[in-house]
Every structure is written in structure tokens, then in C-alpha cells.
Image (tube, rainbow, N blue to C red):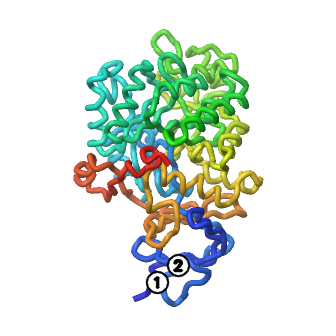
Amino acid sequence: MARFDLILAGGRVLDPANAMDGVADIGIKSGKIEAVAPELDPFDTEKTVDVTGKWVMPGQIDTHAHVAGLSRNWDPAIGYGMLARAGTTTVLDMGGTGPSLIDGIKRKGAGLNVAGLFAMIPGSTIPGRDPTTEQLPDIVALALQQGCIGVKMLGGYHPFTPEITAEIIRACNNQMAYIAFHLGTKESGSHLNGLREIPGLVGKGRLHVCHVNSYCRGVIEAADDECDEALDILENMRGQLNSEAYHAVQNGTSGSCDKDGNVLANVPQNCLRMRGYPTTRDGMRQAILDGYASVVGQKGGQIMYMRGREALDIFEKLNTQVGMSFPVNLPSSAFKLATSKNTKGEFIVDAVSTDGGSHPRNVAIQSTMALVQFGALTRLELACKLSLTPARMLGLHDKGHFSEGADADITVLDPALNEPVMSFVAGEPIMIGGQVVGTGGRLMVTPQGEATARDSGLPYQVLDLSQSKLYAGY
Ligand SMILES: [Zn+2]
């Protein structure tokens, strides 16, 4: 029997955990890394794929994407294929429910590993308005039981009071549930003021701060100063926070207006104000016609940004209940947040994410490769930002590196094209040359969700979040 099932031969292997940046062969056996060496025996393998001239990194882990959400004008599960095409092998979904997650993987999974968070939406996923302190432990327990690994608070859309927000963080911490927060309480907003509340809300606890770039759009202070302050807040809480930033200029938000014609959520209100539009249905109409606002829509199997008349028609037809996008993220903030380090040379923002999935902006790999070409990051730092640190954030100690026995999750990048060209999960290809070949997916759960995972019939993996960066605090 051959020693290897597969050899990826002749690529430039990027493995920051093992300080390796050089040309080597990678040998895979039974879904695991069997050997990495300058030359492996080409006669001792079932199959060889020549990756000469390519960069070979541990599979990209996207710590912020959307594949299980609730949407009326597109099917979020399409996002699995979009992520696989973009080179992702493992994704942290930022908010649906256990059932929507499992349903999506079964229908449209693309072979990825998937961990999901339970979105706390009053009147939808949780009963009533603000939950009470007494209800919170049960809500968290239910989220885990459903097969989510924790909870997502959507402060930019469904903010709670600061008191309840702090209680939710505490309830999650008590059950060692993952807890991610799109910032903003009823007393702040989805901007720098939301970040300023974090030390008080978290106390000595733990929290994943979502998409730091979105609080550095220049809404409260000059954007550059907002970045400096954001970096200070994150650095002062080192060991307590997970964080990521995405690089796309387009954001993702909602068009919802109330019956009086006022835009409901804080994020789209901010976007309209930034260009002087009224925060009303009419303001939104005008922003769409002017080409500033686009509507996220599905055409056939594709999700895309619709503009102009076509976008307005969908907005009216669905009575404002549409996903929307504005070009409000600043590349200068993305650059600064991606590259800034503390005095010890450690990155302050942990990871580059996409906030994509079913939003058509899965550009994390391309944008980070561009930072390498630009000289702002090294190749090994790229692999840290896109794989090694994300693996640690989630406690996935068999991912993010190519040590012997590690999971054979691999993303192959083409530096000439500046894009991912191939990826593997557990040694099996899920994307080849931009074509998705993976199906289904592996559900990641906590021990509390194991029964649900087993009943779902999906392959699954039980995570130990006590070993994650979030809770182990390294
Ligand atoms: Zn998001």
C-alpha cells in the first residue's frame, strides 16, 4: 500500500506554526498530514498534484461569514459554495439557528467545516423584546443544544440595554459558549461609541468583537483616529477578546423601514447620514437610484449586488425587507487594522474575515495576498491572519498548520493570479480551479450539541472551547 493518498508537489509551503516558508512536498494519508519534506517519493503515493509556483497554506478559516441567516430575498445557504470558491475550508457562521444551519449544509453544503452561532433576534429567534436576566442561561443552553457553538448579538440591528448586553456575555461565559457581538447597545450604536462600551460590558469576561473595521468609518471621529482608539481598546483587553476585520468596501445591512417610513436599524441610518440622505424610505429610494445603495439579490443560483431601477423594484416589491449594501468601508482603515502590531510585534486584530458567505464579498484571501505583494505583510503573516490564528480562536488545534497528524485542510493560492485556485478538506478536494466539487459539510458543535449533531446525520466534530483562544486567553 502506498504511504500517501495524495502528494501536493513542489509548492511554496506556508506554515507559520513551524516557521516554514519554502518549496516542499506535502504528503497526505487518511485525511491527515503525513509528511512535509523537500522531496517525497513520487512512487509512494496514489496520486500527485503538481502545485509548482503556487503558495500552499493551511486551509483558510473564515471567522465571520453568513450562511445560515434569515433572509427574504436570497437563500443564505448559497454562501457555502461562494465560500468554497473563495478558498475557505472552515467557516464560523455569524448567526442563524441550529435548524437553519443544519438545513443549509444538507441542501447546499460545499464540503466545508461549519461552526454556527445562534442569532439573538427578539420576536423572532427569541420571544418578546429584551430577554430577562433569568431567561438568559436557558437561551444560551438551547443555542448549544441546537448545534450552535454559541451566540451572536446583533447590536447594530437588535440592540439590548447595556445591562442586558453584559448579562448575555456573562451567561455565555458561564457556559463556555462562544459569544460574538456586532457592537452597539441601546445607548451607543454600531460605531466607535459601541467599542468604547466594551471594557465596561465585558469586565473580566470574554468576547469576540465582530468586524472592527465597521466601527472605523469616520462616523464619530476622523477614521484614522477611530482606528487608533479601536486598536488601543483591543490591545488593553488582550487575552479577553477575539477580533477580526474584513477588507471589502461594500458593507452588508438591511433596508427595513417601519410603517411610518423611517429606516429601522442603526447601520443603514449611519450609511444614509454619511452622504446626507434622510433616514427614511424616500432617502433610501434616492440612495438606490443614485447608485449609492445596492440591494443584495439572487439571480438564479447567484447572489449579487443589484443597482438602480432593478434594485428599487425589489426594494418596493418586498416592502423594504431586503438585504442592502453601501460602499462605506474605508480601505485605509482595513489596511491599518490588518497590519497593526503591538510593541511585542503581535497583531492587535486577530484575523482577516470576509463578513461574506452569502454576501458577494469573499475577498479575504485576495486582499491579504495583495497586502503581501504590497510589502505590508509577509507570506507567513498571511497564513497567520487567514488560518493559524483563526484556528486558535476556535480551539481547532488540528487545523491552521502542517504538523504531522494535522487535518489535511489546505488552500492553494496562485500568486500570479492573486487568487485561491484549489482547496482540500480532510485531504479531499472541495474546490478546483474555481469550481466547487465539495458537498455536504462537517458540523462543529460543543459537547451540549452532540446529540443534535448525531441526529442530524451530518458528519460532526465536538469542539472544546476551553482550549480556544477566547477562553484559554493566550
Ligand atoms: Zn456579519
Residue that badge 1 annotates: 46
Residue for point 37% across, 47% down: 104
* Residue 377 or residue 425, whichever sits in front: 377
The image position of residue 5, as x and y in percent, is 45, 79
Q: Is residue 443 visible?
A: yes
Q: Quadrant of residue 150?
A: top left
Q: Badge 2: how crowded within 10 Å, few (<14), some, or many (20+)?
A: many
The count of marks equals 2
Residue for point 66% across, 40% down: 337
Secondary element under disc 2, as helix, strand or loop, is: strand
Whether 189 is drawn above or below 102: the answer is above
* Residue 366 or residue 220, whichever sits in front: 220
Which numbered mark, 1 or 2, is in the foreground of this view? 2
Question: For the view shown, which residue lies furthest in the right direction?
Answer: 374
Identify residue type, mark 1: Glu
Q: In the picture provided, is 300 more to the left or to the right than 445?
A: right
Residue that badge 2 annotates: 7
The image position of residue 164, as x and y in percent, is 38, 22
Secondary element under disc 1, as helix, strand or loop, is: loop
Q: In the picture provided, is 386 more to the left or to the right than 127?
A: right
Q: Which mark is residue 280?
A: none
Q: In the picture provided, is 335 more to the left or to the right than 282?
A: right
Residue for point 52% across, 64% down: 401
